Every structure is written in C-alpha cells, then in structure tokens.
Image (spheres, rainbow, N blue to C red):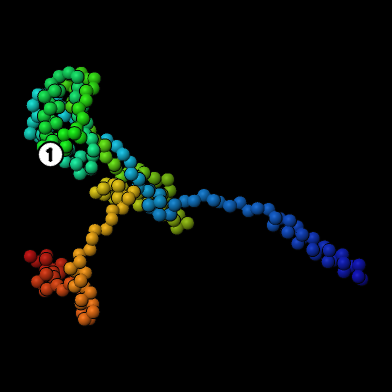
C-alpha cells in the first residue's frame, strides 16, 4: 500500500514539473512606445531658413507697390532681429539702379547701413535683384496620417493625425520662434499695485479691482446695441 501511494504522488507531481519548466521561458515584451499626446507626435522645432524677396529689374525705376514691398521687407528683417541683409544684383540689365534704390529703402526703413551686404550673381538680362535675410522658423511634421480607421478601434487611442492642425497653428502664429528654445524672462511687477494689494489684504479688504456697473455688459445687451 505504501508503494502505491508513492507512485500516485509521483504521477501527480509530474504535470507540475512540466508547468514549472514552461514558466522558465521569457515572455515576449512589446517595447514599442507610441506617443499618446499631440505635442509628442508633432513636436514643434525651431529651424533656420532664408526669407527672400525678388525685385524686378525690367525697369530702372521701382513702382510704388515695389517700394512698399521692400520697405515692409526691411521692417520684417528688423523685427526678426536679422544682423545681415544681402542684396544680390544680376551682372546685366538695369540692376545697378534698382539695387541702389532697394538699399536706400532698406536704410529708410531702419536697417543699419553696415548690416546690408551687396553682392553680384551671374544671370541674364531681366533677372531680379534678390534680397534675403536669415531668420528662425517654428516647424512641425506634416499632417495627413490617415493610416487608421478612427471609426473602428478597440484600443480607445487617439488617431495618428490628432492634434496636428493645432500644432501647425501654434507654430504659425508664434511671435518669436526662439521662445520655444529659451522662454522669455518675466516682466517686472507693478510695485504700486503690489503695495496696494498688501495694504488691502492687511485691513482686511477685497484685493480684487472693483468694476463699476457701467463697465459690465452681458451678451444680450451688446447684441441689442
């Protein structure tokens, strides 16, 4: 009877040893990381590129519209903090007088004379005077990833194209792309307003700015005006 009991026990433990042997195998791990947030999928990056303006040399004098374009181009260069503006003129045609007038308009718009570099390039008659300066742009990846059917999903995840348009809009309207690299320092606080807030707080008194009834309006009131 004892032998029979030992045999039954050994047979019962055999499947357990088999399962233990299977558990020693390493499970396959999916280490692929899929960005969940829109700013991870479409990060805004800062790139440097050239801004270009072509000024026609078919006539020796600029039209009022051309002069306005050159003036606004110079103002954009100043706003972008450009340290150098290059005026390239073709080697033939009426480029000399056009390039000279372009330089005068740039100086009149506020560009320092020492920041303007005049160069020549090989081109035939009728080639434009090319005005360029380098600036930084905020860019992100292109939209249009419709690789997944957003109507049929069992994972409850965001579609690949989610948030791309928002990122493009932010990159397009930012005033200074360098703010993405180095944020601006905070402006100094108003000391007089801060002093008044502390005085009102110690009384105690409501520290919020009071608004008169004449300064408040509702949507219905505005619509009737």
Instruction: Give the answer, above or below, for where 155 lies relative to 206.
Output: above
> Could you tell me residue 60's position as x and y percent?
9, 24
> Could you tell me residue 49's position as x and y percent?
29, 37
Q: Is residue 171 left or right of residue 6?
A: left
- Badge 1 density bin: few <14, some 14–19, many ≥20, Cα 10 Å: some
> Could you tell me residue 100's position as x and y percent?
12, 27
State the SS at label 1. loop
Which residue lies at the image location 85% right of the left edge and 66% below the top edge? Answer: 8
Q: Residue 133 lies in what quarter of the image? A: top left
222 or 4: nearer the viewer: 222
Which residue lies at the image location 22% right of the left edge and 25% below the top edge? Answer: 119
215 or 200: nearer the viewer: 200
Instruction: Give the answer, above or below, for where 19 lies relative to 175.
Output: below
Can you identify the residue that label 1 sits on?
109
**Quarter containing the N terminus:** bottom right
* Residue 112 visible here: yes
140 or 148: nearer the viewer: 140
* Residue 152 visible here: no
- Residue at the extreme bottom of the image, as rendered: 203
């Amino acid at each position: 009877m004892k032998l029979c009991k030992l045999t039954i026990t050994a047979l019962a433990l055999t499947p357990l040893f088999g399962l233990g042997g299977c558990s020693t195998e390493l499970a396959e791990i999916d280490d692929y990381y899929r960005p969940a947030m829109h700013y991870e999928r479409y990060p805004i990056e800062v790139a440097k590129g050239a801004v270009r303006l072509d000024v026609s040399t078919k006539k020796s004098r600029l039209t009022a519209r051309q002069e306005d374009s050159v003036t606004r181009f110079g103002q954009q260069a100043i706003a972008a903090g450009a340290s150098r503006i290059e005026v390239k003129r073709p080697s033939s045609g009426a480029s000399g007088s056009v390039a000279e007038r372009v330089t005068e308009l740039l100086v009149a718009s506020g560009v320092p004379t020492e920041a303007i570099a005049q160069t020549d390039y090989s081109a035939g008659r009728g080639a434009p005077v090319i005005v360029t300066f380098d600036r930084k742009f905020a860019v992100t990846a292109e939209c249009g990833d419709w690789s997944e059917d957003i109507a049929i999903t069992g994972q409850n995840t965001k579609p690949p194209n989610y948030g791309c348009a928002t990122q493009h809009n932010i990159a397009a309207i930012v005033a200074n792309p360098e703010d993405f690299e180095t944020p601006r320092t905070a402006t100094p606080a108003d000391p007089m307003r801060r002093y008044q807030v502390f005085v009102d707080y110690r009384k105690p008194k409501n520290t919020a700015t009071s608004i008169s009834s004449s300064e408040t309006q509702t949507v219905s009131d505005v619509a009737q005006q």
